[in-house]
Image (cartoon, rainbow, N blue to C red):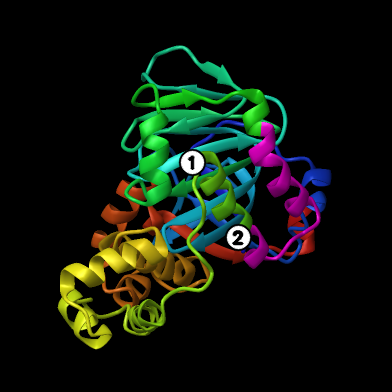
């Protein structure tokens, strides 16, 4: 999925060459609106009742987003500052070259590093203007998440060694510039997380009982998921099923279902559906419930996003 991500930034206009390089002529545009700032002459508007309300919607980054159960990859050119936020997901920040900067205190100094691992629920701002960055958000309760948390020297922003960053980022960078499809990027991101954690990915030959359970979860993602019912259909006790699910997928059942729901909702919303529709389709109580959950997991407010088809003229 090709997207624009605009998150309350201050930055110069994006060069035409950068848009063309990233192949955005036919991509999707996701703009995250910052409120309550308004600019009368802003080129981007939102109609509310009888009034036209303008928002400061400078672009923070341009690139692609790929989702999977337990994680997501946000990949592209950074053009501005992403304001202070936090998220429950663990975050790997991997610039393809150059430096990134983080600010952990509202008025604190900017900390420069070649890459970073950010622990869950740690407030931070981020900037790497002009740099292409791979940001991987993933479940802290997964096997990889637990292993990486055990390696963290502190809570918050942990700096990564330059050679380590290069080793992790190089395969993703090569795939990105070769215009790899979503499946290839998804697999690379999952392997990158496992490599960083020093663990092996779960076997591709997953137990058929877990395959059947995953298929049922996805088919009925708009309904409540009951551990007991899944366990009975697998012919296992709830405790044994829970243990087998983690062993086969690397992610606890509850976390797996939450990520599946978020991924389904964001995919619907980023594809042009209403956020209310997206929330109900993924078994959230309403769009407010989806917003709270997404903010907690990703530091992102989905209800302030909208999709527009990006034509060739808009990149000129």
Q: Is residue 311 left or right of residue 243?
A: right
Q: In the rendered image, which quarter is residue 263 located in?
A: bottom left
Q: Magenta segment: does it hold 180?
A: yes
CB under 8 Å between discs 1 and 2: no
Secondary element under disc 2, as helix, strand or loop, is: helix
Magenta residue span? 166-185
Give the structural element (helix, strand or loop) at label 1.
helix
Would residue 158 be found to the left or right of residue 42 on screen?
A: left
Decide if residue 18 is on the left or right side of residue 266: right
* CA neighbours of label 2 inside 10 A, class few (<14), some (14 to 19), many (20+): few
Kindly give the residue lying farthest to the top in the view shown: 109
Q: Height in image: 282 above or below 166?
A: below
User: Where does the N terminus fall, quadrant-wise?
Assistant: bottom right
Q: Position of residue 170 (x, y in %)?
A: 72, 41
Residue at the image point whose x is 38% and y is 50% from the top = 143
Q: Which circle's residue, 1 or 2, is located before the other in the chain?
A: 2
**Residue 168: percent from the left, percent from the top?**
64, 40
Which residue is depicted at the point 73% across and 58% down? 24
Image quadrant in which you'd find residue 186: bottom right
Q: Is residue 78 visible?
A: no
Q: CA distance from mark 1 to mark 2?
A: 15 Å
Q: Main secondary structure of the magenta part?
A: helix
Query: In this view of the protein, which residue sits in the foreground, 133 or 171?
Result: 171
| Residue on which disc 2 sits | 187
Instruction: Out of 235 and 161, give the one closest to the viewer.
Output: 235
Residue at figure coordinates x 27%, y 74% from the top left = 283
Q: Residues within 10 Å of mark 1 (few under 14, many from 20)?
A: some
Residue hosting label 1: 197
Q: Place residue 96 in its image quadrant.
A: top right
Q: Is residue 235 left or right of residue 307?
A: left
């Amino acid at each position: 999925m090709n997207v624009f991500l605009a998150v309350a930034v201050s930055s110069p206009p994006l060069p035409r060459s950068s848009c063309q390089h990233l192949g955005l002529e036919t991509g999707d545009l996701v703009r995250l609106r910052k409120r309550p700032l308004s600019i009368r002459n802003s080129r981007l508007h939102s109609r509310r009742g009888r009034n036209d309300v303008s928002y400061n919607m400078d672009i923070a980054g341009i690139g692609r987003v790929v989702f999977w159960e337990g994680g997501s990859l946000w990949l592209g050119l950074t053009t501005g500052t992403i304001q202070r936020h936090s998220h429950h997901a663990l975050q790997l920040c991997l610039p393809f070259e150059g430096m990134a900067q983080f600010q952990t205190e509202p008025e604190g100094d900017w900390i420069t590093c070649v890459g970073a691992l950010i622990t869950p629920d740690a407030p931070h701002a981020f900037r790497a203007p002009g740099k292409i960055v791979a940001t991987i958000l993933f479940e802290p309760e997964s096997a990889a998440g637990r292993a990486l948390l055990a390696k963290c020297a502190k809570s918050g922003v942990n700096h990564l060694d330059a050679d380590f960053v290069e080793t992790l980022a190089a395969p993703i960078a090569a795939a990105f510039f070769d215009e790899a499809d979503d499946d290839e990027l998804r697999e690379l991101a999952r392997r990158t997380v496992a490599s960083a954690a020093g663990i092996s990915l779960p076997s591709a030959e997953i137990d058929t009982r877990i395959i059947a359970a995953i298929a049922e979860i996805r088919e009925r993602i708009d309904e409540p998921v009951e551990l007991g019912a899944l366990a009975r259909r697998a012919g296992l006790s709830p405790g044994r099923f829970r243990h087998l699910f983690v062993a086969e997928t690397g992610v606890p059942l509850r976390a797996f279902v939450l990520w599946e729901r978020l991924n389904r909702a964001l995919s619907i919303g980023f594809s042009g559906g209403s956020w209310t529709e997206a929330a109900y389709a993924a078994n959230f109580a309403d769009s407010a419930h989806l917003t709270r959950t997404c903010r907690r997991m990703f530091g992102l407010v989905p209800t302030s996003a909208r999709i527009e088809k990006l034509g060739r003229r808009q990149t000129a």
